[in-house]
Image: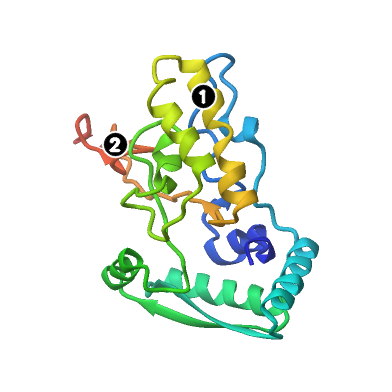
Amino acid sequence: MALSVDKQSYVDTVLQNGSIPANGLVPKKFTFDPKDNKDYRDEVGDVGVYNLDEAKKAWTQGLKELGVTSLNLEFTSDDTENAKKSSEFLQNQWEKNLPGLKVALKNVPFKIRLANDQKQDYDFSLSAWGPDYQDPSTFLNLFRTGNTQNRMSYSNPAYDKIIDQAAGPLAGDTQARWDEMLKAEPILIEEDYAIQPLYQRAKAFLQQPYVKDLQKNAFGPDYTFKTTYIDGK
């Protein structure tokens, strides 16, 4: 299912706001190698890329192993207009590309979706994450065993070891820590298919010309108003 969604088509037809396909968990132009300033995304490369042939092959094998010819699943998402459009697009992709799959949509208010995620009361679910600080760990830590945001009980000792090494023994060695974190995404996304990154969000703004020095942030709060002022000229 992870490989069967055309992410480029999704951002082009549904979002239409400058967002780009996400072939990885850590976004582009966010964190950089301390040695040569290379982008984390470039160093890890693309993972979880749309591949319909591989998706169909894996789907057929999966149904065979289960001893079934069809599968019914429920997809949970928010009830905003954008979330509904996203859900319908994804439903169409899965049902069109994976024969025998039927996806029922469950669009609920954010608070209910969040509660269901916390209780792990879902088949599969769409959610988003905004980084709190500028480091790969703000994304990678989410899926360590026992993390409060790990709302699917994902657990892999090899993945946990990478996260623990980065937070512990390698914390004082900037380069070694960085190199260790490069190993995490392929385990999470390509070996275990625990998650499927869909898109890297972009935003469009309308701002009056007399509003000055409004800071728009790539991590932490969306805006910083500390230096913002109104030009009365």
The residue where tag 1 is placed is: 178
What is the count of numbered marks? 2
Residue at 48%, 81% in the rendered image: 105
Tell which tag, 2 or 1, sits nearer the viewer: 1
Q: For mark 2, does the 10 Å Cα neighbourhood hold few (<14), some (14 to 19), or many (20 or more) residues? A: some
Q: Tell me the kind of residue under disc 1.
A: Trp
Residue 165 rendering spot, x and y as whole percentages: 45, 28
Establish if 8 lies above or below 169. below
The residue where tag 2 is placed is: 214
Residue 96 appears in which quarter of the rendering?
A: bottom right
Question: Which residue is nearer to you in this view: 103 or 188?
Answer: 188
In whole angstroms, how far apart are the C-alphas of marks 2 and 1?
Answer: 32 Å
Q: 198 left or right of 145?
A: right
Q: For mark 1, does the 10 Å Cα neighbourhood hold few (<14), some (14 to 19), or many (20 or more) residues? A: many
Establish if 194 lies above or below 90. above
Question: Would you say the residues marked 2 and 1 are in contact, meaning their CB atoms lie under 8 Å apart?
Answer: no
Residue at 22%, 34% in the rendered image: 228
Establish if 163 lies above or below 2. above
Residue 139 rendering spot, x and y as whole percentages: 43, 42
Q: 11 left or right of 96?
A: left
Q: 229 left or right of 65?
A: left
SS for dot 1: helix
The N terminus sits in image quarter: bottom right
Q: Tell me the kind of residue under disc 2.
A: Leu
Q: 172 left or right of 190?
A: left
